[in-house]
Image (cartoon, rainbow, N blue to C red):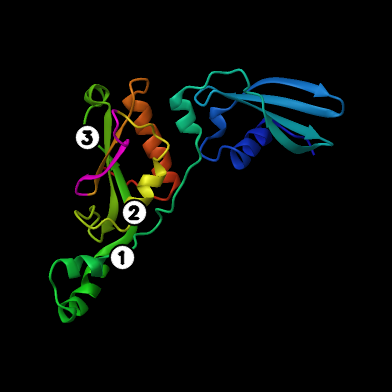
């Protein structure tokens, strides 16, 4: 078996960085260490150098050779493989909302199936329509995320029990001005993520997209 650069890139993606693609990795060097062949690949966005080891005609493993490289906060956040489960909306909380709305048990029994049937089952998301220049000035990027209804729209109040998951998904963002980075439900299923001066809105948008979609949220066409 002949090991190729494409094989090495696929190994890096499958083993270490599943949110990247082959075009993100460029081969920097190739060397021999005894019977092993070492190919080093770089990722400019992540600031990483990964060496893939070929032994006896097969990929034996990989090692990080990034030591000494200064990694920015943006790069660290892009590289963090944090994920949560956003593949399906949890409708178990609808009953609680109906109870809080003052409905009787009898009314809830009639209304609950209709409410649940109104959901498609997907968690959907979409970016803010705010321009990036304004977001850079405000140090804040907004995005919509929540359960999808059968007509293809975002439900305006029910969160599908994803709010606690969103907190986990962005918990590694730094506190800004003594305030937690993520504001859940700043408006109806609309969330805001603050970021420090050293970051740019375009990078934060990229991180939001990567993490939400890697976790199972879907961006519908036209959003």
The percent position of residue 116, horizontal first and vertical second, equals 26, 68
The first of marks 3 and 1 along the sequence is 1
Residue 25 located left or right of residue 196: right
> Do residues under tags 3 and 2 come within 8 Å of each other at their CB atoms?
no
Q: Kindly tell me whether residue 108 is visible in this rendering.
A: yes
* Residue drawn at the location 42% of the way across and 41% of the way down: 211
For disc 2, the marked residue is 162
In the rendered image, the quadrant that contains the C terminus is top left
* Residue drawn at the location 71% of the way across and 26% of the way down: 39
The first of marks 3 and 2 along the sequence is 3
For disc 3, the marked residue is 129
Residue 91 badge: 1
Q: In the image, is residue 79 part of the stretch drawn in magenta?
A: no
Residue interval drawn in magenta: 177-188
The percent position of residue 203, horizontal first and vertical second, equals 38, 27
- For label 3, the SS is loop
Front position among marks 3 and 2: 2
Front position among marks 3 and 1: 1
The first of marks 1 and 2 along the sequence is 1
The percent position of residue 25, horizontal first and vertical second, equals 58, 27
In the rendered image, the quadrant that contains the N terminus is top right
* Residue drawn at the location 27% of the way across and 26% of the way down: 139
* Residue drawn at the location 61% of the way across and 17% of the way down: 68
- Residue 11 quadrant: top right
Residue 104 located left or right of residue 1: left
């Amino acid at each position: 078996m002949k090991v190729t650069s494409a094989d090495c890139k696929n190994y890096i993606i499958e083993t270490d960085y599943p949110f990247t693609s082959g075009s993100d990795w460029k081969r920097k060097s190739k060397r021999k260490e005894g019977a092993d062949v070492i190919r080093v690949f770089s990722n400019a966005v992540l600031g990483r150098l990964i060496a893939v080891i070929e032994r006896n005609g097969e990929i034996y493993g990989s090692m990080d050779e990034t030591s000494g490289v200064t990694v920015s906060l943006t790069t660290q956040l892009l590289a963090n493989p944090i994920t949560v489960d956003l593949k399906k909306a949890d409708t178990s909380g609808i009953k609680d909302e109906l109870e809080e709305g003052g409905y009787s048990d009898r009314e809830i029994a009639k209304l609950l199936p209709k409410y649940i049937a109104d959901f498609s089952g997907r968690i959907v998301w979409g970016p803010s329509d705010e321009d990036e220049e304004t977001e850079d000035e405000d140090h804040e990027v907004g995005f919509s995320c929540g359960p999808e209804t059968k007509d293809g729209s975002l439900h305006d109040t029910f969160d599908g029990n994803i709010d606690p998951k969103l907190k986990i998904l962005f918990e590694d963002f730094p506190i800004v001005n003594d305030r937690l980075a993520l504001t859940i439900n700043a408006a109806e299923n609309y969330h805001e993520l603050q970021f420090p001066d050293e970051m740019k809105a375009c990078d934060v948008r990229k991180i939001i997209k990567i993490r939400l979609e890697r976790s199972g949220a879907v961006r519908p066409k036209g959003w």
